[in-house]
Amino acid sequence: MPEKIRKKSDDILKVCLQNIKNTDVMQSVEYEPAGGRISMSGAWGRAEYRTYIKERLSNEMLSLLIHHAKSLDTGAKPLLLSDYINLNIANVLHRNGMEFVDMAGNMFLKQSPLYMPN
């Protein structure tokens, strides 16, 4: 992966993890780089995700991402981390049950009993 792309992906990951940690319902947020997984926990329980880090998400890329995420069964739900998720893309993600966090602080997390429809 070219250095510039890796840097942007690292920035997206860092800011999105901080946004998750800044919510008042998270007690622990851990990232496992080898598996690309995030574990979060709080008084509500524990959730595990496999991450997809995407910059400048287009509608075409979104369709491919949703298809890919749904076709894999790794035991962890997919979580999209991005620089920005606009309202139209957020609506498509909601309809397809795909959770997300962006650098602007927008997020949709839904693993019972955790539900953050921001």
Image (spheres, grey):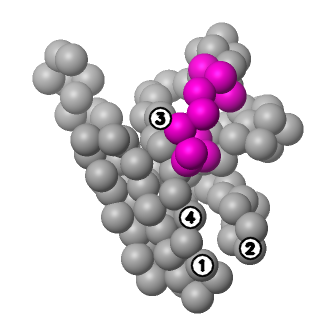
Residue bounds of the magenta highlight: 68-80
Q: Which residue is mark 3?
A: 52
Cβ atoms under marks 4 and 1 closer than 8 Å: yes
Q: Which residue is mark 4?
A: 47
Binning the other alpha carbons within 10 Å of mark 4 as few (below 14), some (14 to 19) or many (20 upward) gives some
Instruction: Tell me if residue 54 is in the magenta stretch.
Output: no
Binning the other alpha carbons within 10 Å of mark 3 as few (below 14), some (14 to 19) or many (20 upward) gives some
Splitting the image into 4 quarters, where does residue 36 fall?
top left
2 displayed left or right of 32: left
| Amino acid type, label 3 | Tyr
| Amino acid type, label 2 | Pro
Q: CA distance from mark 3 to mark 1?
A: 23 Å
Q: Secondary structure at mark 2?
A: loop
Most foreground residue, 106 or 34: 34
Q: CA distance from mark 4 to mark 3?
A: 16 Å
Q: Which residue is mark 2?
A: 113
Taking the spot 74% from the left edge, 68% from the top edge, the residue there is: 112
